[in-house]
Amino acid sequence: MTAAALRALLASGGVTHLPGVYDPPTAALAVRAGHRAAHLSGAACAALDLGLPDLGYVHGTHIAERAARITPALGGAPLLADADTGYGDALQAVWTARRYAAAGVSGLHLEDQVMPKRCGHLAGKELIDAEAAARKIRAVVSDGTGIVVVARTDAYTVTGLDDATTRGRRYAEAGADAVFLEGVSDLDELARAHAALPGVALVLNRSEAGAHADRASDADLAAVGVRLVLHPVAALLAALHAADRAYREIATVGRATVERLAWTEFTGLVGQDEALALDAKHDR
């Protein structure tokens, strides 16, 4: 069970980096690179499925559908997926967790913003009451899917670190497996959070959407309780940058010269040789 594998990473005492994946080929590339878990971003789903920004347009249905296409390519490595606010109250959060679990998602992160939510790096966020957020967590945990619950709070940029850690403690008491303090990346502040949340696994976000200047080593992060580090859109932005250059080169010189995968690598990622072998076996 991949949820058990994700819980093992949270309990390992070390740091695991979760790169963002957004389709089967990127999932296969992440596994090939040696990653033991991956992340699916709501912002990526909003952009790729709807062509829209991360301003509450995407729903758990979109994320679950994309996750269901991704998880088979992960070869058993767990996928942690963005669940925004759970898309409602406790009832809707439980439905979301069930849909994610059915899609093969190992864990979700659930945040305490009002709906419609805003990207965590934007101004103008509003928080729901901490008890209302804790009620969603309790409902998901008690429902029996076994999915890992990461409680995300956006309090840091709204009401400060102390409120963020107070909320984090409340969410851990409600049954969350880990706490995600959105916007907190400074090592000293992470140390303060770790002291306020003893024994609670912390999740760090290293998204390009934020102005993160932290250069802390994995050993330093592990010492302050960080267990997962998310890189939600790094690969997506790299791919779009390469695509932009390829399109410009085709428009100006008639062919693309940007460095890219060989065709055989691409067909290998999508299992062409295995499919042809299966076709040959049954073509009699």
Image: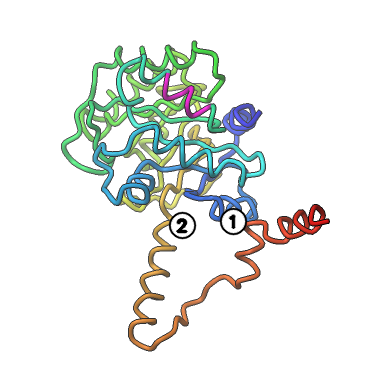
Task: Decide: is 277 above or below 128.
Answer: below
Residue 212 coordinates in the image, percent (x, y): 34, 50
Left or right of 279? Residue 160 is left
Q: Residue furthest front?
A: 284
Left or right of 284? Residue 20 is left
Amino acid type at mark 1: Leu
Task: Decide: is 154 above or below 146.
Answer: below
> Which of these two is toward me, 283 or 104?
283
Residue 44 coordinates in the image, percent (x, y): 38, 48
Quarter-wise, where is residue 93 in the image?
top left
The quarter of the picture where the N terminus appears is top right
Q: Find the magenta span and give its range.
A: 95-101
Q: Which mark is residue 235?
A: 2
Q: Which mark is residue 116?
A: none
Q: Is disc 2 placed on a helix, strand or loop?
A: helix
Residue at (27% x, 23% y) in the render: 163
**Is residue 92 part of the magenta span, yes or no?**
no
Amino acid type at mark 2: Ala
Alpha carbon separation for disc pair 2 and 1 = 10 Å
Classified by dominant secondary structure, the portion drawn in magenta counts as helix
If you read the primary sequence from the N terminus, does the residue marked by circle 2 or circle 1 appear first? Answer: 1
> Which of these two is toward me, 222 or 270?
270
How many labels sit on residues?
2
Q: Residues within 10 Å of mark 2 (few under 14, many from 20)?
A: some
Q: Which residue is mark 1?
A: 29
Q: Is disc 1 placed on a helix, strand or loop?
A: helix
Asked if the residues shown at circle 2 and circle 1 are in contact, with their CB atoms under 8 angstroms apart, the answer is yes
Residue 157 coordinates in the image, percent (x, y): 23, 35
